[in-house]
Image (cartoon, rainbow, N blue to C red):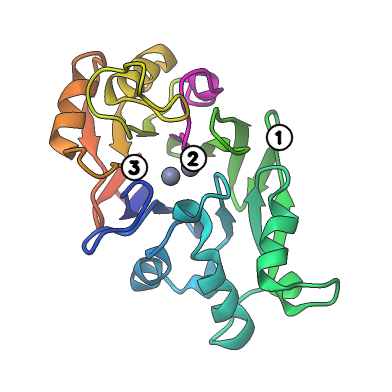
Amino acid sequence: MTSLTVLGSSGGSPTRTNPASGYLLRSGDTTIWLDAGTGTFMALAAHTDPGTLSAVVLSHMHVDHCADLFGLYGYLAFGPSGIVPIPVYVPKGAAEHLAAFAGAGAEHVFRVVLDIVEVGAGDSVPVGDLRLRFGDARHSVPGLVTRIETADGVIAYSGDTGPGSDLDEIGHEADLLLCEASIAGERDAQSYSHHLTAAEAGAIAEAAGAARLVVTHFATGVVPETAVAEAQAVFGGPVDAAKPGETFTIGEEE
Ligand SMILES: [Zn+2]
Ligand SMILES: [Zn+2]
């Protein structure tokens, strides 16, 4: 069985009850922290020892997806530590960005505990028994859409994206598509081009042939139940809203 636990699903900023974007994927002995949004490090630590992570994926360099990487950095460098280095897959240009925040020169401990690896569309890497494949998001900064292939099936994740990303292909016949739905209602001239409406998330799930859709990254004012209904109107499969602490599974129970 492979599970995806929601650490936070708040878009843009954390709220008092919901961290920003972060998910814990567990499959056999392999654990992946998928986006390290504000507030998600402590939520992660409630579920697993962060020092035993197999890998981290940061979809892009907005703080609501990457800021808590520095919580992991402190944990590994100055705290309980773990099995280092932990690989961190990031979009192009992000490695120096992260190192600059840590003030990390060539010999710095940041580079000892974290192995930051830039990836892009078409790249594929093994993590334990899993395989990650990446595509391009359409966002205001370079971003990744991510396909995670496991023995139990496929989970795909949008990160932040507007229409026109590689998600149709990266999410092809996914057992679970985790897709942002930042914008309420119909797209209009004022809508951000670098985020999706819930209906657009539903249309991507339908085009990709996904079995199931979980909508996430709820901006202030977006009601998750409304987003589910809007996605459900265009997607034939089941739709759920990502809520902190909730776990979705694919594959057989062990
Ligand atoms: Zn975001
Ligand atoms: Zn973003």
Q: Secondary structure at mark 1?
A: loop
Report x, y in % for residue 37. Answer: 44, 57
The reply to whether callout 2 and callout 1 are in contact (CB within 8 Å) is: no
| Stretch of the chain drawn in magenta | 156-172
For this rendering, which residue is in front, 220 or 57? 220
**For mark 3, does the 10 Å Cα neighbourhood hold few (<14), some (14 to 19), or many (20 or more) residues?**
many
- Image position of 175 with respect to 74: above or below: above
Q: Looking at the image, is mark 3 or mark 2 earlier in the sequence?
A: 2
Q: Secondary structure at mark 3?
A: loop
Task: Quickly name the residue at label 1.
Answer: 123
Q: Secondary structure at mark 2?
A: loop
Horizontal side of 249 relative to 61 (left or right) equals left
Task: Quickly name the residue at label 3.
Answer: 217
The reply to whether callout 3 and callout 2 are in contact (CB within 8 Å) is: no
Horizontal side of 158 relative to 90 (left or right) equals left
Magenta: predominant secondary structure element?
A: loop
Task: Quickly name the residue at label 2.
Answer: 151
Residue 45 part of the magenta segment = no
